[in-house]
Amino acid sequence: MIGRILATVVIVGLLGFDFMLPRFEMLQQGRDPVARADAPAAVVVVDEPMPDFTLPDLDGVPVTLSSLQGHRVLLTFERSVDW
Amino acid sequence: MVAYQILCGLMGVAWLVVGASLFSMFFAFHSPGGRSGGLFATMGPQGHYLAAFAGCALITWALLLLAAARRPLEGRAVGTATALGLVLCASYRMVAWVVGDYAAVADLLRIESAVFLTLALGFVWLRPARVEAAT
Protein backbone atom coordinates (compact mmCIF):
# COMPACT_ATOMS: atom_id res chain seq x y z
CA MET A 1 0.00 0.00 0.00
CA ILE A 2 2.85 2.37 0.85
CA GLY A 3 4.35 1.71 -2.57
CA ARG A 4 1.07 2.61 -4.25
CA ILE A 5 0.74 5.82 -2.26
CA LEU A 6 4.32 6.83 -3.04
CA ALA A 7 3.80 6.09 -6.73
CA THR A 8 0.60 8.12 -6.67
CA VAL A 9 2.35 11.09 -5.07
CA VAL A 10 5.05 11.01 -7.75
CA ILE A 11 2.57 10.64 -10.62
CA VAL A 12 0.19 13.32 -9.32
CA GLY A 13 3.19 15.64 -8.84
CA LEU A 14 4.23 15.08 -12.45
CA LEU A 15 0.63 15.64 -13.58
CA GLY A 16 0.59 18.94 -11.68
CA PHE A 17 3.86 19.93 -13.35
CA ASP A 18 2.40 19.01 -16.73
CA PHE A 19 -0.64 21.23 -16.15
CA MET A 20 1.57 24.10 -14.93
CA LEU A 21 3.63 24.13 -18.12
CA PRO A 22 2.88 27.23 -20.17
CA ARG A 23 0.40 26.72 -22.94
CA PHE A 24 1.40 26.52 -26.59
CA GLU A 25 0.11 30.04 -27.37
CA MET A 26 2.77 31.43 -25.02
CA LEU A 27 5.51 29.75 -27.01
CA GLN A 28 4.11 31.37 -30.12
CA GLN A 29 5.16 34.83 -28.91
CA GLY A 30 8.60 34.68 -30.43
CA ARG A 31 7.57 32.82 -33.53
CA ASP A 32 7.80 34.02 -37.05
CA PRO A 33 4.37 35.54 -37.85
CA VAL A 34 4.23 37.44 -34.56
CA ALA A 35 7.81 38.64 -34.94
CA ARG A 36 7.04 39.85 -38.44
CA ALA A 37 3.92 41.61 -37.24
CA ASP A 38 5.94 43.40 -34.55
CA ALA A 39 8.52 44.83 -36.93
CA PRO A 40 7.71 47.02 -39.93
CA ALA A 41 8.86 45.64 -43.26
CA ALA A 42 12.48 46.59 -43.85
CA VAL A 43 14.97 45.43 -46.42
CA VAL A 44 18.58 45.02 -45.37
CA VAL A 45 21.06 45.48 -48.21
CA VAL A 46 24.74 44.57 -47.88
CA ASP A 47 27.05 47.66 -47.87
CA GLU A 48 24.05 49.97 -47.33
CA PRO A 49 23.14 51.56 -43.96
CA MET A 50 20.92 49.39 -41.79
CA PRO A 51 17.31 50.65 -41.60
CA ASP A 52 16.64 52.21 -38.20
CA PHE A 53 14.71 50.12 -35.67
CA THR A 54 13.83 50.17 -31.99
CA LEU A 55 13.90 47.16 -29.68
CA PRO A 56 13.60 46.81 -25.88
CA ASP A 57 16.80 45.97 -23.98
CA LEU A 58 16.92 43.43 -21.13
CA ASP A 59 15.40 46.02 -18.77
CA GLY A 60 12.61 46.84 -21.19
CA VAL A 61 14.05 50.25 -22.11
CA PRO A 62 13.63 50.94 -25.84
CA VAL A 63 16.91 51.28 -27.74
CA THR A 64 17.06 52.76 -31.22
CA LEU A 65 19.77 51.71 -33.65
CA SER A 66 20.44 55.33 -34.62
CA SER A 67 21.24 56.14 -30.95
CA LEU A 68 24.22 53.78 -31.25
CA GLN A 69 25.72 55.61 -34.22
CA GLY A 70 29.52 55.78 -33.93
CA HIS A 71 29.65 52.53 -31.95
CA ARG A 72 30.14 49.04 -33.26
CA VAL A 73 26.88 47.09 -33.06
CA LEU A 74 26.69 43.31 -32.98
CA LEU A 75 23.25 41.83 -33.59
CA THR A 76 22.66 38.28 -32.41
CA PHE A 77 19.54 36.18 -32.91
CA GLU A 78 18.72 33.56 -30.32
CA ARG A 79 15.84 31.24 -29.67
CA SER A 80 13.74 32.11 -26.66
CA VAL A 81 11.36 29.95 -24.65
CA ASP A 82 9.72 33.10 -23.24
CA TRP A 83 10.43 32.65 -19.57
CA MET B 1 -9.67 -7.13 -11.31
CA VAL B 2 -11.85 -6.86 -14.42
CA ALA B 3 -10.94 -3.18 -14.78
CA TYR B 4 -7.23 -4.14 -14.68
CA GLN B 5 -7.84 -6.76 -17.37
CA ILE B 6 -9.66 -4.25 -19.57
CA LEU B 7 -6.89 -1.67 -19.07
CA CYS B 8 -4.18 -4.22 -19.92
CA GLY B 9 -6.14 -5.50 -22.91
CA LEU B 10 -6.88 -2.09 -24.40
CA MET B 11 -3.36 -0.84 -23.92
CA GLY B 12 -1.93 -4.09 -25.24
CA VAL B 13 -3.93 -3.76 -28.44
CA ALA B 14 -2.98 -0.07 -28.80
CA TRP B 15 0.73 -0.80 -28.32
CA LEU B 16 0.52 -3.72 -30.73
CA VAL B 17 -0.88 -1.45 -33.44
CA VAL B 18 1.65 1.35 -32.80
CA GLY B 19 4.56 -1.10 -32.51
CA ALA B 20 3.64 -2.93 -35.71
CA SER B 21 3.30 0.41 -37.52
CA LEU B 22 6.74 1.59 -36.40
CA PHE B 23 8.29 -1.76 -37.27
CA SER B 24 6.74 -1.89 -40.73
CA MET B 25 7.64 1.77 -41.38
CA PHE B 26 11.32 0.73 -41.46
CA PHE B 27 10.65 -1.76 -44.27
CA ALA B 28 8.39 0.69 -46.12
CA PHE B 29 11.13 3.33 -45.96
CA HIS B 30 13.76 0.97 -47.39
CA SER B 31 11.54 -0.46 -50.12
CA PRO B 32 12.23 0.87 -53.66
CA GLY B 33 10.96 4.45 -53.87
CA GLY B 34 9.80 4.29 -50.27
CA ARG B 35 9.72 7.37 -48.05
CA SER B 36 7.83 8.47 -44.97
CA GLY B 37 5.56 11.47 -45.00
CA GLY B 38 4.17 13.93 -42.49
CA LEU B 39 5.97 14.23 -39.18
CA PHE B 40 8.25 11.31 -40.13
CA ALA B 41 9.46 12.88 -43.38
CA THR B 42 12.75 14.12 -41.89
CA MET B 43 13.59 11.01 -39.86
CA GLY B 44 16.07 9.50 -42.31
CA PRO B 45 17.65 6.02 -42.10
CA GLN B 46 18.86 6.43 -38.49
CA GLY B 47 15.44 7.61 -37.31
CA HIS B 48 13.70 4.69 -39.01
CA TYR B 49 16.23 2.27 -37.50
CA LEU B 50 15.43 3.57 -34.00
CA ALA B 51 11.69 3.63 -34.77
CA ALA B 52 11.87 -0.08 -35.75
CA PHE B 53 13.66 -0.83 -32.48
CA ALA B 54 10.96 1.06 -30.57
CA GLY B 55 8.37 -0.92 -32.55
CA CYS B 56 9.93 -4.24 -31.48
CA ALA B 57 9.97 -3.10 -27.84
CA LEU B 58 6.32 -1.97 -28.07
CA ILE B 59 5.23 -5.30 -29.58
CA THR B 60 6.97 -7.14 -26.71
CA TRP B 61 5.34 -4.79 -24.18
CA ALA B 62 1.96 -5.32 -25.86
CA LEU B 63 2.25 -9.11 -25.68
CA LEU B 64 3.09 -8.91 -21.97
CA LEU B 65 0.06 -6.67 -21.41
CA LEU B 66 -2.19 -9.07 -23.31
CA ALA B 67 -0.84 -11.96 -21.23
CA ALA B 68 -1.57 -9.94 -18.07
CA ALA B 69 -5.10 -9.27 -19.36
CA ARG B 70 -5.67 -13.01 -19.65
CA ARG B 71 -4.03 -13.91 -16.31
CA PRO B 72 -4.11 -10.76 -14.16
CA LEU B 73 -2.90 -12.41 -10.95
CA GLU B 74 0.26 -13.76 -12.59
CA GLY B 75 0.67 -10.52 -14.54
CA ARG B 76 0.63 -8.23 -11.53
CA ALA B 77 4.24 -7.14 -12.08
CA VAL B 78 3.37 -6.15 -15.67
CA GLY B 79 1.15 -3.40 -14.22
CA THR B 80 3.97 -2.08 -12.05
CA ALA B 81 6.45 -2.10 -14.95
CA THR B 82 3.90 -0.52 -17.27
CA ALA B 83 3.19 2.28 -14.79
CA LEU B 84 6.92 3.00 -14.57
CA GLY B 85 7.25 2.89 -18.36
CA LEU B 86 4.36 5.32 -18.77
CA VAL B 87 5.88 7.73 -16.23
CA LEU B 88 9.17 7.63 -18.18
CA CYS B 89 7.29 8.27 -21.44
CA ALA B 90 5.48 11.24 -19.86
CA SER B 91 8.72 12.66 -18.39
CA TYR B 92 10.62 12.95 -21.66
CA ARG B 93 7.53 14.32 -23.41
CA MET B 94 7.33 17.16 -20.88
CA VAL B 95 11.02 17.93 -21.40
CA ALA B 96 10.51 17.79 -25.17
CA TRP B 97 7.65 20.26 -24.84
CA VAL B 98 9.73 22.68 -22.75
CA VAL B 99 12.68 22.47 -25.16
CA GLY B 100 10.45 23.79 -27.93
CA ASP B 101 12.05 21.85 -30.80
CA TYR B 102 8.82 19.91 -31.27
CA ALA B 103 6.55 22.94 -31.73
CA ALA B 104 5.11 21.35 -34.89
CA VAL B 105 2.94 19.05 -32.78
CA ALA B 106 1.82 21.91 -30.51
CA ASP B 107 0.09 20.83 -27.28
CA LEU B 108 0.06 17.15 -28.26
CA LEU B 109 3.11 16.38 -26.08
CA ARG B 110 1.47 17.82 -22.95
CA ILE B 111 -1.79 16.03 -23.66
CA GLU B 112 0.06 12.74 -24.22
CA SER B 113 1.93 13.27 -20.94
CA ALA B 114 -1.32 13.82 -19.06
CA VAL B 115 -2.91 10.72 -20.65
CA PHE B 116 0.14 8.55 -19.88
CA LEU B 117 0.28 9.72 -16.26
CA THR B 118 -3.44 9.08 -15.81
CA LEU B 119 -3.02 5.59 -17.28
CA ALA B 120 -0.05 5.05 -14.92
CA LEU B 121 -2.31 5.92 -11.99
CA GLY B 122 -4.78 3.35 -13.32
CA PHE B 123 -2.11 0.65 -13.44
CA VAL B 124 -0.92 1.52 -9.93
CA TRP B 125 -4.38 1.26 -8.36
CA LEU B 126 -6.11 -1.37 -10.50
CA ARG B 127 -3.43 -4.06 -10.46
CA PRO B 128 -4.27 -6.94 -8.11
CA ALA B 129 -2.95 -6.56 -4.57
CA ARG B 130 -0.09 -8.83 -3.44
CA VAL B 131 -2.41 -10.65 -0.99
CA GLU B 132 -4.97 -11.16 -3.74
CA ALA B 133 -2.28 -12.67 -5.99
CA ALA B 134 -1.03 -15.00 -3.24
CA THR B 135 -4.41 -16.64 -2.63
Image: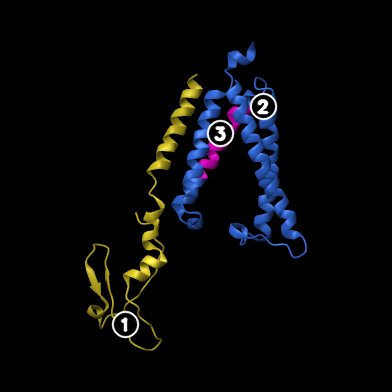
Q: Which residues are magenta?
A: B78-92
In the picture, which quadrant includes the C terminus of chain A? bottom left
| Neighbourhood count class around disc 3 (C-alpha, 10 Å): few under 14, some 14–19, many 20 upward | some
| Most foreground residue, A24 or A50 | A24
Chain bearing mark 1: A
- Which color is chain A depicted in? yellow
Q: Is residue A58 above or below residue A11?
A: below
| Neighbourhood count class around disc 2 (C-alpha, 10 Å): few under 14, some 14–19, many 20 upward | many
Q: Which residue is mark 1?
A: A51
Q: Which residue is mark 3?
A: B84
Q: Relative to residue B71, is residue B4 drawn left or right?
A: left
Residues at marks 3 and 1 touching, judged by CB atoms closer than 8 Å = no
For label 2, the SS is helix
Q: Which quarter of the figure has residue A60? A: bottom left
Q: Which quarter of the figure has residue A65? A: bottom left
Q: Which residue is mark 2?
A: B68
- Which color is chain B depicted in? blue
Give the CA separation, mark 1 to mark 2. 68 Å
Q: Relative to residue B124, is residue B37 drawn left or right?
A: right
Which residue is painted at 47% across and 33% down in the image? A11
